[in-house]
């Protein structure tokens, strides 16, 4: 069963996907993403395929494999390796976005069992929505643009790209990555843009893994221009990275009052996070 329902009062969209109840939590034998595995029978550098357990119908959910190396991390791929991932994200954004039943393409990654990742092999996913999701629509309507003066919340800046800690982050560890000049989406990025983005991601994820001297569980997603026929000319590509850890191995849980009211209580000072990550450069 796959059905999209809308809360009649709040307008919240809920995808009821009964088929995902049968999804295995862990592979029964070996890694399906390693070369020769179920999802990667042939050698590859990067690879995408349709998710066997899609959250939405119509072949709108894909898995992206970053590397055949099971023990790699995003920063260990280096700029060249991450550039391959960026190019594949752009390719799939263009292909899925060209479909009449797709209005928004979201590339994202969950790393670590703390955020629900069931397979350790470096990979992400892509969801192609038949509407513009509410949060992305609100950011677009609000005219999202890079913070013009993040001050001591800046983490890194290079080649026209900046990473900073948001002013009011929901998660204890939260970053935004964006070009300082407006770029709408992945497909419209030049070679230089893609190289600069790749270098920034290697830098940032290297800092994040060094922060607690162990791999950091995180969620990452890419916000970009909707793939509708026209409009949204002011869209500004950006990446959000968040982690539930408030210290090494200690998870911050979203509690009742926060869920009930959508007002959050963050125990970590954003400027302290930025200062620590700057030191790790």
Image: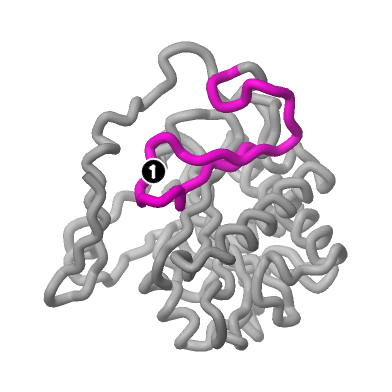
Q: Could you say which is closer to the camera, residue 278 or residue 171?
A: 171
- Location of the N terminus by quadrant is top left
Q: Mark yes or no: residue 99 visible.
A: yes
Residue sticking out furthest to the front: 100
As helix, strand or loop, the secondary structure at mark 1 comes to loop
Q: Position of residue 116 (x, y in %)?
A: 39, 39
Q: Position of residue 60 (x, y in %)?
A: 45, 52
On screen, residue 181 versus residue 270, left or right, reads: right
**Residue 172's quadrant in the figure?**
bottom left
> Residue sitting at 49 percent across and 29 percent down?
119
From the viewer's perspective, is residue 11 above or below residue 113?
Answer: below
The magenta span reads 37-65
What type of secondary structure mainly makes up the magenta span? loop
Q: Position of residue 248 (x, y in %)?
A: 49, 40
Q: Mark yes or no: residue 272 visible.
A: no
From the viewer's perspective, is residue 129 above or below residue 81?
Answer: below
For disc 1, the marked residue is 54
């Amino acid at each position: 069963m796959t059905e999209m329902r809308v809360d009649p009062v709040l307008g919240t969209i809920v995808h009821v996907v009964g088929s995902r109840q049968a999804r295995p939590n862990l592979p029964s034998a070996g890694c399906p993403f390693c070369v020769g595995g179920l999802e990667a029978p042939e050698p590859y550098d990067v690879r995408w395929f349709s998710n066997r357990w899609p959250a939405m119908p119509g072949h709108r959910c894909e898995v992206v494999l970053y590397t055949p190396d099971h023990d790699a991390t995003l920063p260990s791929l280096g700029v060249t390796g991450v550039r391959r991932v960026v190019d594949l994200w752009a390719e799939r954004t263009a292909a899925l976005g060209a479909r009449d039943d797709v209005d928004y393409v979201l590339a994202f990654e969950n790393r670590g069992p703390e955020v629900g990742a069931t397979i350790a092999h470096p990979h992400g996913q892509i969801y192609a929505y038949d509407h513009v999701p509410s949060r992305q629509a609100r950011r677009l309507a609000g005219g999202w643009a890079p913070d013009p003066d993040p001050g001591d919340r800046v983490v890194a800046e290079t080649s026209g790209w900046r990473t900073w800690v948001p002013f009011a982050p929901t998660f204890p560890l939260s970053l935004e990555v964006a070009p300082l000049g407006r770029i709408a989406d992945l497909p419209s990025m030049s070679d230089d843009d893609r190289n600069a983005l790749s270098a920034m991601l290697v830098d940032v994820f290297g800092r994040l893994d060094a922060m607690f001297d162990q791999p950091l569980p995180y969620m990452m997603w890419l916000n970009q221009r909707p793939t509708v026929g026209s409009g949204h000319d002011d869209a500004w590509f950006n990446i959000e990275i968040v982690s539930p850890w408030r210290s090494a191995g200690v998870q911050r849980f979203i509690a009742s009052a926060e869920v009930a009211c959508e007002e959050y209580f963050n125990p970590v000072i954003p400027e302290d996070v930025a200062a620590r990550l700057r030191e790790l450069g």
